[in-house]
Amino acid sequence: MIYNKHNTTKQPIPNEPRASARAELRTHKNLQAPNGLVLRNMLFAIFLSSAFLCLLTPKTYAGGFDHAFQTAQQRAVKLYGLGAGQQVGYGTGIIASEDGYIVTVLSLIISGDRIRAVTANGQRFEAELIKRDTDQQLALLKLKWPDDADASTKNKPIGPLPHYDFSCQELPSESCHHPLLPGDWIVSAGNPFKIADGAEQMSLAHGVFSARTRLDARRRSKDFRYTGDVLLIDAITSNPGSPGSVMVNLQGELVGMIGRLVISNRTHTHLNYAIPYDVLADFYLQATQASPDGTRELITKPVVEPFDPGIRISHTGFRTVLPFVDRVVRNSPAKRAGLRKDDLILSVNDHEVSDVSEFDKRIKARDPAESIELIIRRKRSILTIHIEPPEAKTQP
Amino acid sequence: MNPRTILILLLLISCQSPSAYADAQKKADDDTALLMATQQTFRNVAASMKSYLVRIDTVGGTQPGAQLNLDNDDIKKGKRRLQNPFRDTLGSGFVIADGPATGIVYSRDGYILTSSFNFAREPALISVTLPDGRRLAADLVARDHVRKLALLKVDADGLPLPTWRRDEDVQVGEWAIALGLGFGGREPSVTVGVISAKNRMQGNAIQTDAKLSPANYGGPVCDVFGRVIGIAVPMAQRAGELAGVDMYDCGVGFLVPESRIKLIVPQLMAGVSFQRGWLGIQVRSVPGVGVVVQSIADPSPMRDAGVLPGDIIEAINGSNLRNYADLAKQIYMIPAGQDLQIRLSRDGGAIELAVPLASAESLGSLPEAEEPFDPSVPVEENTPDDQEEPTPPAPD
């Protein structure tokens, strides 16, 4: 009854990506229906390709989230490595290329001497760390196999390695970039609690996409370094081993990767979130470029000197808890933005500040290149003040 | 035909028969189309509810529990944060963050309904951001400490109102879509589940498995047509301002339904809060006998009604009691001022009484145990839980 509404009103369903999935299946079906006997060579070719398809895709999709999940889990690897205490020695990664690049989260696993990866068909490989980005908490690994490796001896992938394409050149574009709307189904494939072993299927979790927002979180008592966009979801993925899981939409297209376990500073709850595809793709493009000095550190954050907004608040006196502006420096960015003495600052860049020390912390922790948005109270009215960075000094 | 060709054909046929494949694929496609339609429904609800959601920011205040040791004067003098904010004084293991909270427009002239959870810190200032982007200072009109609701008022007019769903029609198993602004930003976050049960918490709540958390407490839980079924609140069968928050995201969440809100709001609009209800008696569980009254506060409604030490409380509101826990369960969700139907047993005869629950302030002191000692009545070993404490709830 619930669905009738939509069936009868012919809601336009965005079927562009679905069509591609169907096309893929149709090709598959045609392969199964050779009309009459044809040339033996052609048959053999068909056999070979269908044998590969049989290996890569299930015989039929059962509907529901099956297609999305199967697509995802074949492109994920189970990772094993160094662990210590609460930092478990296992996780998940996404296969990013046929030659074995793996995108995953930065964790203790990849810091050890030995990283092992198990593909969906149960093949085991050693992996090496190629690049890591501490600001974004991401890492790029590569599966290793000997030059003279042979698929028959199983030290090389049997058939082409299924992978997600991170190297879209036309970002953002419809084909590479999969925007989600709040309420869209999401499916994740990963290995929480290392339940799956060898060729065993990974764990499926489903839920909906909640919202895209900036991450403001911590791990234990430290602030989490990644403060970029995240995709919040309502599937419970904040479990050990889940970070690095593939997250796809209903069509099985990659939309993100489950991030590290963090606690939100806004709600004090464990967050279930994914790093968006566009962030991953940017990282992948940069990380796969050879660096001249051969370093494994990737620095994606440009170094910018923070500007002084020119707000002065008295720190002395035990009764001055609330951040009332004592003085606004002449000709400062804050002055130009219209801030006045005795304004009460309520929030800095969408973060509530209830005392002077929090105000200081937020001013220090802000992205130095960006403008500052203050919410202030002036008498009974609440105002928003945008403090723009001063004009960039021309290079001498 | 050579043997190899035959082998290939056999393999192809065994791999899958084309017609069976097509049937299964048709079913799978239909199933996926259904999911697509459902997803479109969630998107529509999320988008349509945006015009009724308000963002609530609070400044100042302490963690609940901390103010137990402080009187209002101390708070005004700025003696805040006497306790480590990460220490939990209520044993619930949860600390309230200072992120934004969610509310919903309740009347055109600026009444905003939300959860009292969002004000457990007794903030000094509340601001409300209306759906149209206006940010206004808000007054906290009144709270319902039992159902965890709160009513705010802002100076606004002509606000758009959501449609409410009559809860008689709500079916267990139907979709429940919850929205919140607690993760920050302008776009609400969405979580989807189903209605798990009705008539929970003495008829005060509907249960859902949507992931309710501080990110959406105070926000609406909607049906597939975007009608509000109720307001998400933390709730548990125990006392305390934070009771139930520790169950966030766990698949057991509660919302106060429309019928209950309709009864609560008029009193809140009049500026009268609902307080927790107290019986003002000390009881003892006696196995095989029941809940025996030991002493009665003076003054208290129970004393006024003529209850005597030694009376056995057999039933409350028609539910038979076996022990203290049964009694507690019956009255946790009933506010002060509301009548209880009590059936007592005294000297073998039954007495029916209607006694209102009292607020904590209106109760007098509890005299020493007045129950006459009867050696023929076996006394249950008191567990720490129900030992010699005034009847529930424990002080907030």
Image (cartoon, coloured by chain):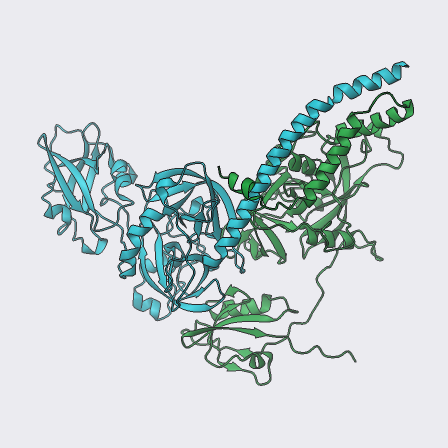
Chain colours: A green, B cyan
**Residue B370 horizontal/vertical position (percent):** 11, 42
The residue under the point 26% across, 57% down is: B267
Q: Is residue B306 visible?
A: yes
Q: Is residue B310 visible?
A: no
The residue under the point 73% across, 21% down is: B17
Work out whether A90 lies above or below A346: above
Work out whether B205 lies above or below A286: above
A114 vs B293, left or right, is right
Q: Residue furthest bottom?
A: A330
Work out whether B269 lies above or below A16: below
Q: Could you say which quadrant of the image residue A98 lies in?
A: top right
Quadrant of the rendering where the C terminus of chain A is positioned = bottom right
The residue under the point 31% across, 55% down is: B265
Q: Could you say which quadrant of the image residue A303 lies in?
A: bottom right
A384 vs B155, left or right, is right
**Residue B196 horizontal/vertical position (percent):** 42, 37
A163 vs A349, left or right, is right
How many numbered marks, from 0 up?
Answer: 0
B293 vs B396, left or right, is left
**Residue A207 horizontal/vertical position (percent):** 56, 42
**Residue A356 horizontal/vertical position (percent):** 48, 71
In this rendered view, identify the residue nearer to me: B240 or B32. Answer: B32
